[in-house]
Image (spheres, rainbow, N blue to C red):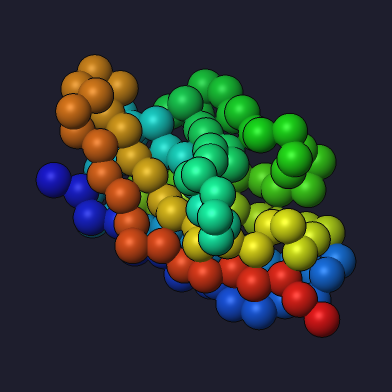
């Protein structure tokens, strides 16, 4: 059982930057780690996913602006967000999925990111 806790959300102006953090209560070395987001009236979407450090994939709308990083020893992942747009406004969720046991999937409670003047 892994508990995830996000932090770093808040209000930022368009063009600004923000860094989200997610800490895990257990080891994450065998977990794919990802950031999702959900805006009002929209489905939850995958923002970025780190396949146990082997590769990182981003949704097209954030490529070149967002960067996912992880530290297995520290049991943390981050999402560095630059050039933020109002459309980035959403609740951002941290996600962990076990590579070999897909039924071992955990979610954080989410952190609100609001991009507005």
- Of 53 and 57, which appears nearest the observer? 57
Residue at 31% from the left image edge and 50% from the top image edge: 107
Residue 19, percent across and down? 62, 64
Query: In this rendering, would 55 be left or right of 1?
Result: right
Q: Position of residue 25 (x, y in %)?
A: 23, 56
- Residue at the limit of the structure toward the front, as seen here: 41
| Image: 3 above or below 7 | above
Depicted 94 relative to depicted 13: above or below: above
Q: Which residue is rendered at x = 47% and y = 50% of the image?
A: 77
Residue at the image position 59 percent from the left and 68 percent from the top: 113
Q: Is residue 58 above or below residue 100?
A: below
Residue closest to the eye, 11 or 31: 11
> Which residue appears at 23% of the width and 55% of the height?
3
The quadrant in which residue 72 appears is top left
Quadrant in which the N terminus is drawn: top left
Left or right, 3 with reference to 23:
left
**94 left or right of 18 in image:** left
- Which corner quadrant holds the C terminus? bottom right
> Can residue 84 be seen?
no
Give residue 106's position: percent from left, percent from top.
26, 44
Q: Residue furthest left?
A: 1
Tell me if 41 is positioned left or right of 96 in this view: right
Q: Quadrant of residue 116?
A: bottom right
In the rendered image, the residue lying farthest to the top is: 100
Res 3 seen here = yes
Report the number of numbered marks: 0
């Amino acid at each position: 059982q892994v508990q995830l806790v996000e932090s770093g959300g808040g209000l930022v102006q368009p063009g600004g930057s923000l860094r989200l953090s997610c800490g895990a209560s257990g080891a994450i070395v065998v977990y794919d780690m990802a950031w999702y987001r959900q805006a009002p009236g929209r489905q939850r979407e995958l923002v970025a996913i780190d396949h146990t450090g082997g590769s990182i994939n981003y949704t097209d709308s954030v490529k070149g602006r967002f960067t996912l990083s992880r530290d297995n020893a520290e049991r943390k992942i981050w999402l560095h967000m630059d050039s933020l747009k109002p459309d980035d406004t959403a609740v951002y969720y941290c996600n962990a999925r076990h590579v070999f046991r897909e039924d071992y999937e955990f979610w954080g409670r989410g952190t609100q990111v609001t991009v507005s003047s």
